[in-house]
Image (cartoon, rainbow, N blue to C red):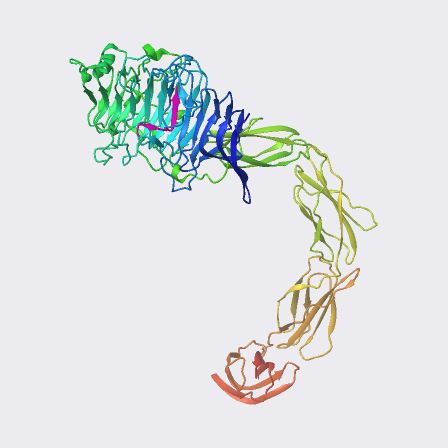
């Protein structure tokens, strides 16, 4: 029977995301799976028991109800299977909003097993010692009991999990830790677990034989790595980073290890083997102000036989290593407790031994075991181990002594569990080997936990274009998410984002971002070469039209043709890879059918697409200019894109009603027999098979003066005429010699003013009253001795 209580299910919807929030309390007595499309809200103590397995999918988000001491407890009869991954860790955190979270918001995770312990037996009816785990989680049924006889006991596995803002006190000295392991056997897997902002210890082992790798303790209040009651497991690769301002009144240490609470000789003895740990204490440098409750990097006491090798301990105020008690110092002297090939730095005292056996010199003992001490932390040369803003880096630099001082994997450390390293500490210098990458979170206070699913994998969407010609398919992909820039690996070899030139078939791309990746499959189909679409006919003239179409994927060129509707097709023209073509030589005012088809590089052709269009009537000439302007001739020039070569040209003197008509067979016409100093109008039309166009807008030009005196050209000049336009008086500046006549004619050729025999010598001015003139254009003419000079005058009223 499954006695889990679902006290509430809330469906949360937003525009792009839908997820369910499931509240959980009570007991889980049958196999249960928590999925990453939900948010699970743990209310109080949740017990997994009676042979049940709680499976938690990768990327599942779990929150604890604040003040309920939210704790997941795997009893001796239950199993846990946390399936987190580097890119989809499982997260158990506070239910408070970002910025409001604090240590003790939740309890944590407790795993209880059947391995041997040395604590006093509380249940004589069960073989082996039984004890009650700290934290006040026991029940009348004994759900809080741990310990037994099976050192190979398997409580399941916890991989890639973060536990945040846990560690709540039940009673002083009886707290729920971030991850508590009581009597857990060696068949259990604990790897890649981060405890952050814990209100007590980050990791505590109460007896048992469980091993662990890749542990992170971040801003824990009390001890980071605590073992007692006969724990005999192995722990390799662990990291601690402290907040200088926050410590526990009981005294906060990096490591703490006891045989039991009284330091008895009870067996099994506590023999935890720690290796490759990087413990970054609160004293970042000599000026760091720290909480007075901080004590030692490692505190080994009460007859423990725990060992620490190949590790770094930095920045503790009392000592890097403190051994306490004569039985503990005897264990060190006899080799049951080892401390070898470690680096200590920035500690107020490197080694301290209190109430130790007389004659035991801890400094001599430590120096004889390849340990190295530095007064300052910078000498260890880690990249950035003190960053509390979210991005610490615990790797040694290339020149760090951690790379060169040597390690010790002898004796008990030859066990197959240990990975032999050449470097001291939790990490190598190689970024790609940084096991903290991606899944850890060093700013959980501000992490966004508003939606279900913790996923750092990139996502990929793609657009597939079918292979319309042989090897012309393509796949264009768009990545999103991830933890950095993207790299690409296609199943057929390319490493580009998009691929083209594909035959029909299946293709797989692996997109990698940081340490995470996604694999996406795409299928390219093979279809008949499609004919062009989106046909339009534009820019029709009397002799041409433009056919436009959309590009066809895979086509390397296009064939076009045309015909009069109902007529015979023109020869086919291959126009290359363009998507428009101008048909020329067409008849005016006619209906045409235009056709285009796609063509592959291998000569496969599509069917034709067709579009009808009409040419227009003859186009009106445009773009006029006058060249070769003389006293008796002028050349009219114009533009006609169709070059019909059949035009009618008309011209006349300004003010004369009748037009003189002539023809032209090119886009220019020279008019002769004109009068000097005379304004002319002109217009041109096009003649074609379908009729004639309208005439162009009327243009004007004025022939030049005919200036002869005794058959010799002489000069007479209207230097200036102002104002122009004029409304009352106009002043005419004249440069000449002798008598001149001044006349003014309107646009109809009617003379409206004349002054005869105006005497000029050099430069003179004549002032003419134009008050009575109507608004319009006028021609001012100066005549003298066969000299004729004209200039236009505008009258405005």
Residue 699 screen position, x and y as percent: 65, 71
Q: Is residue 514 visible?
A: no
Residue 423 drawn above or below residue 463: above
Q: Which stretch is magenta?
A: 172-182
Q: Nearer the viewer, residue 422 or 37?
A: 37
Residue 179 covered by magenta stretch: yes
Closer-to-camera residue (393/490): 393
In the figure, residue 133 lies in which quadrant?
top left
Measuring from the top left, give residue 298's x and y in whole percent: 27, 23
Is 199 covered by the magenta stretch? no
Residue 750: image x %, image y %? 65, 85
Task: Name the quarter where the N terminus is drawn.
Answer: top right
Q: Residue at x 36, y 36 (%)?
A: 390
- Tell me where residue 27 appears, x and y as whole percent: 49, 28
Residue that sits furthest to the right in the current view: 566
The part of the image, by quadrant, that contains residue 304 is top left
In terms of depth relative to the viewer, which is nearer, 681 or 149?
149
Image quadrant holding the C terminus, namely bottom right
């Amino acid at each position: 029977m499954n006695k889990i209580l679902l006290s509430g299910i809330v469906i949360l919807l937003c525009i792009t995301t839908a997820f369910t929030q499931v509240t959980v309390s009570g007991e889980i007595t049958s196999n249960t799976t928590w999925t990453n499309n939900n948010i699970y809200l743990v209310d109080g103590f949740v017990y997994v028991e009676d042979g049940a397995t709680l499976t938690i999918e990768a990327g599942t988000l779990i929150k604890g109800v604040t003040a309920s001491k939210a704790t997941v407890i795997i009893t001796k009869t239950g199993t846990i299977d946390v399936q987190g991954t580097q890119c989809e860790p499982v997260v158990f955190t506070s239910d408070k909003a970002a910025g409001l979270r604090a240590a003790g918001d939740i309890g944590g995770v407790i795993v209880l097993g059947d391995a041997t312990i040395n604590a006093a037996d509380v249940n004589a009816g069960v073989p082996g010692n039984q004890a009650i785990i700290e934290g006040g989680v026991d029940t009348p049924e004994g759900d809080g009991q741990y310990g037994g006889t099976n050192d190979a006991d398997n409580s399941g596995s916890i991989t890639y999990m973060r536990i945040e803002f846990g560690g709540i006190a039940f009673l002083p000295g009886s707290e729920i830790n971030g991850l508590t392991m009581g009597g857990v056997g060696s068949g259990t897997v604990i790897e890649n677990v981060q405890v952050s902002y814990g209100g007590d210890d980050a990791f505590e082992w109460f007896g048992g034989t469980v091993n662990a790798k890749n542990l992170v303790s971040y801003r824990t209040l009390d001890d980071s790595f605590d073992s007692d009651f006969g724990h005999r497991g192995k722990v390799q690769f662990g990291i601690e980073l402290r907040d200088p301002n926050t410590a526990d009144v009981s005294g906060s240490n990096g490591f703490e290890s006891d045989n039991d609470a009284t330091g008895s000789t009870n067996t099994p003895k506590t023999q935890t083997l720690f290796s490759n740990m990087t413990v970054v204490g609160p004293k970042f440098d000599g000026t760091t102000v720290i909480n007075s409750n901080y004590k030692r990097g490692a505190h080994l006491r009460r007859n423990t036989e725990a060992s620490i090798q190949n590790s770094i301990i930095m920045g503790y105020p009392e000592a890097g290593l403190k051994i306490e008690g004569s039985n503990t110092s005897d264990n060190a002297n006899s080799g049951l407790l080892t401390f070898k090939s470690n680096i200590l730095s920035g500690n107020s005292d490197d080694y301290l031994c209190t109430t130790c056996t007389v004659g035991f010199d801890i400094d001599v003992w430590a120096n004889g075991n390849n340990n190295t001490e530095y007064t300052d932390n910078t000498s260890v040369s880690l990249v950035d181990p003190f960053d509390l803003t979210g991005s610490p880096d615990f790797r040694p630099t290339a020149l760090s002594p951690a790379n060169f001082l040597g390690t010790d994997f002898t004796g008990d450390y030859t066990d197959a569990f240990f990975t032999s390293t050449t470097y001291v500490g939790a990490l190598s210098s190689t970024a790609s080997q940084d096991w903290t990458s991606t899944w850890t979170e060093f700013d959980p206070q501000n992490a966004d936990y508003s939606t279900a699913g913790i996923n750092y994998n990139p996502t990929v969407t793609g657009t597939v274009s079918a292979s319309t010609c042989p090897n012309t398919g393509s796949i264009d992909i768009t990545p999103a998410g991830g933890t950095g820039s993207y790299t690409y690996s296609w199943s057929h070899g390319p490493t580009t984002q998009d691929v083209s030139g594909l035959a029909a078939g299946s293709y797989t791309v692996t997109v990698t971002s940081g340490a995470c990746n996604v694999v996406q499959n795409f299928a390219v189909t093979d279809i008949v070469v499609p004919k062009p679409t989106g046909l339009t006919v534009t820019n029709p003239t009397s002799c041409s039209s433009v056919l436009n179409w959309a590009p066809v994927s895979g086509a390397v060129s296009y064939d076009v043709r045309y015909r009069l509707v109902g007529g015979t097709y023109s020869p086919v023209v291959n126009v290359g890879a363009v998507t428009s073509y101008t048909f020329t030589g067409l008849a005016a005012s006619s209906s045409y059918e235009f056709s285009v088809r796609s063509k592959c590089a291998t000569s496969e052709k599509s069917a034709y697409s067709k579009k009808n269009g009409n040419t227009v009537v003859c186009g009106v000439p445009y773009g006029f200019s006058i060249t070769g302007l003389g006293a008796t001739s002028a050349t009219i020039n114009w533009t006609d894109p169709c070059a019909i070569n059949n035009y009618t040209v008309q011209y006349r003197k300004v003010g004369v009603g009748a037009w003189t008509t002539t023809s032209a067979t090119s886009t220019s016409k020279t008019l002769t027999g004109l009068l000097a100093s005379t304004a002319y109008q002109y217009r041109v039309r096009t003649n074609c098979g379908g009729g004639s166009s309208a005439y162009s807008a009327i243009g004007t030009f004025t022939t030049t003066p005919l200036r002869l005196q005794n058959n010799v050209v002489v000069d007479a000049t209207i230097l200036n005429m102002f104002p122009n336009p004029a409304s009352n008086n106009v002043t005419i500046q004249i440069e000449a010699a002798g008598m001149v006549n001044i006349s003014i004619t309107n646009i109809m050729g009617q003379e409206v003013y004349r002054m005869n025999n105006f005497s000029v010598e050099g430069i003179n001015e004549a002032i003419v009253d134009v008050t009575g003139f109507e608004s319009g254009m006028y021609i001012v003419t100066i005549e003298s001795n066969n000299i004729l000079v004209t200039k236009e005058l505008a009258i405005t009223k």
